[in-house]
Image (cartoon, rainbow, N blue to C red):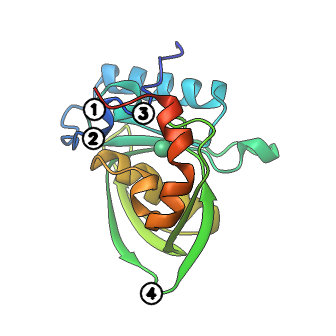
Amino acid sequence: MSILPIVQFPDPMLRRPCTPVTAFDTALRRLAADMLETMYAAPGRGLAGPQVAVPRRLFVMDCTWKEGTPSPRVCVNPEILATSDTLVVQTEGCLSMPGVPARVARPDWVVLRWTDLDGARHQARMDGFEAVCAQHELDHLNGRLCIDLMPEDARLAVSPLLTALGTPS
Ligand code: ZN
């Protein structure tokens, strides 16, 4: 396994919609293992394909390892099937925008469907931080960043932090 470089904002790679994974092979297995290792080393709780310069529809997440109970998930070709009507506001961080806190409102639960590395389909309802994480990572696969969901005034407030990360090339 190896730790991959994390693509940093405002790299245009982060804005590219990703294409579905079609081959469930050893290369995909290795990529997922590397993404998990990269996420743990960062340290973070989620990492999506474009963040390691792979424009494919997969992400890894583990919302509990920092509390001492690892629960790694690899979600390939994920889809959100249902969401709550109620929204919750939480502060999100992104490994591609270090030091930029994003206060974002999202549905507080989602039903996620995904495929695992063996090609088996799964479906689960996710709540709380796990729901936030899954939505944040799925957005990456569509070229969307958490700052896009911030109200205008809040985004203006963090714009100096974003500028410090660099300007779009
Ligand atoms: Zn992110």
Q: CA distance from mark 4 to mark 1?
A: 32 Å
Look at mark 3 in the image and give the residue it sits on: 9
- The foreground one among 59 and 107 is 107
Residue 63, x across and y down, in percent: 64, 50
Residue 96 appears in the rendering: no
Distance from disc 3 to disc 2, alpha carbons, whole Å, reads: 10 Å
* Nearer the observer, 140 or 75: 140
Query: In the image, is the residue at mark 2 within 8 Å of ligand 1 by its beta carbon?
Result: no
Q: Is label 1's Cβ within 8 Å of ligand 1?
A: no
Question: Which one is closest to the eye, mark 4 or mark 1?
Answer: 1
Label located before the other in sequence (4 or 1): 1
Marks 2 and 3: in contact by CB < 8 Å?
A: no
Mark-to-mark CA distance, 3 and 4: 31 Å
Q: Nearer the viewer, residue 88 or 119?
A: 88
Is the residue under label 4 in contact with that under label 3 (CB below 8 Å)? no
Dot 2 alpha-carbon crowd within 10 angstroms: few under 14, some 14 to 19, many 20 or more:
some
